[in-house]
Image: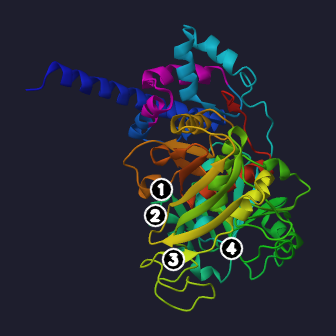
Amino acid sequence: MSTEKEEACLKQWQEQESLAEEMIPLLGRLYRTCQVVPLMYGRSMVNQSVIQLLKHHRYARHAEGVELEVSDTFALVKRLIELEPGPAHIDVGKLAVAYKRSGEHDVAGFLKKELAPIVGQQGKGGSAQPRDVVLYGFGRIGRLLARLLIERTGGGQTMRLRAVVVRGDSSDLEKRASLLRRDSIHGPFPGTLTLDYDNDAIIANGNRIQFIRAESPDSIDYTSYGIDNAIVVDNTGKWRDREGLERHLASKGVARVLLTAPGKGDIKNIVYGINQHEADENERVLSAASCTTNAIVPVLKCLSDRYGVERGHVETVHAYTNDQNLTDNYHKAERRGRSAPMNMVLTETGAAKAVTRALPELEGKLTGNAIRVPIPNVSMAILNLTLEKECDRESLNGYLREMSIDSKLRRQIDFVDSPEVVSSDFVGNRHGGIVDGKATIVDGKNIVLYVWYDNEFGYSAQVIRLVQHMAHARLPSFPSPN
């Protein structure tokens, strides 16, 4: 026979479920009508299941040490809609915790004060034409970028995936769609896909994506497809120097080019959150650096700012990638010809050198190497550093945890302190890197940090943030980070 305590627990859970169900259409209205992206400590609340919303609320206890109930956020969301806010990222979780701590009893008054710049601004931002985005290539990163761009269209944000450029003919459209629809690592496409065979296009969640067939980047007239002033995201990795990438600019309708790999020569390598200010309009060709660089640079920036970095070594334990062989076969690179799913493969990485292109103060201070391991996704960077100032494990972890919650780098840095996490737990994580606090080692000035990262999805999320910056589509964030 169940006890009163058991019945109370179940009743409380059911009440939370019921409120979460009621909140889902309100969150959708905020997103689609107000162009507000509601967040829970950086985690999107849009298109989430009831259970996922409840898990997001639970995260507040980990982040702030405060129990956050759905009833707390439900009240804020209802009042928020009534205030008719303009486009923004609004962290409902942080606002709810701040409201509880404030001791105030007027939700509307609190929100008007906290969100003053956007209150009553719904629909007053004009009807700017969405910026055209073209994906040149449709491999692992290209398809994840497509998912993320399609996801963002729902809120009316000012970017739209207009076309994908691939080689071959239209006979492979169904194959291309199938690879977008099903992914062995990241799961099924979150929505519906319809194929327009006659016009070589895919309609994904209402987004019509034209497939353009071309053998070279300078042979396309995008304007003939109604595409103009486009940002082309080259995810093929075939051209990495200025001469090769500027070929895109010879095609009609192209304004700027972004490479999803480290750029060579004088091409600026941008890690969003660190040096995106260098991506001004005069720079028509840019690089989004590498997945490893995006994982470690934000963490290194925090360490450099607080403690200083004398020297260090970065060892990357990296998932195998498509440029390796499934079975032993010829490969022009050393060791990469050996079977990827059967071996750990020692190889080189340019991440240590690439760091200095975003953080010049670390020039000459870092070395690096890499080991490819037999898993298909999620990697780890091990930072073995000597700092300029001594610290202890608790203060170092506390600082990095704080940076992950309430700083301008909160979307680049995540923090976990569970003793049970493994690589598969980070599949789909949208941060550049995730600091594993339980693994941190500190001995005076000498530290070892372990930073996980989804080298596919986390990197793709960073690329999209940079594309948004280039398209002037970044929304203001509330509450403002410290």
For mark 3, what is the residue? 345
Q: In the image, which is nearer the foreground, mark 2 or mark 3?
A: 3
Q: Amino acid at mark 4?
A: Thr
Q: Amino acid at mark 3?
A: Val
Q: What separation in Å lies between label 4 and label 2 (alpha carbons)?
A: 20 Å
Sequence-wise first label, 1 or 2: 2
Q: Residue 441: within the magenta?
A: no
Hey, which residue is sitting farthest front in the picture? 444
Mark 1 vs 2: CB contact within 8 A: yes
Q: Which residues are magenta?
A: 56-84
For mark 1, what is the residue? 427
Residue visible at 54% across and 7% down? 105
Looking at the image, residue 80 lies above or below residue 333? above
Hey, which residue is sitting farthest left in the picture? 1
Q: Residue 68: within the magenta?
A: yes
The disc at residue 185 is 2
Residue visible at 76% across and 49% down? 130
Give residue 349's position: percent from left, percent from top. Answer: 64, 70
Sequence-wise first label, 3 or 4: 4
Q: What separation in Å lies between label 3 and label 4 (alpha carbons)?
A: 23 Å
Q: Residues within 10 Å of mark 4 (few under 14, many from 20)?
A: some
Sequence-wise first label, 4 or 2: 2
The disc at residue 114 is none
Q: What separation in Å lies between label 3 and label 1 (alpha carbons)?
A: 22 Å
Q: In the image, which is nearer the foreground, mark 1 or mark 4?
A: 1
Sequence-wise first label, 2 or 3: 2
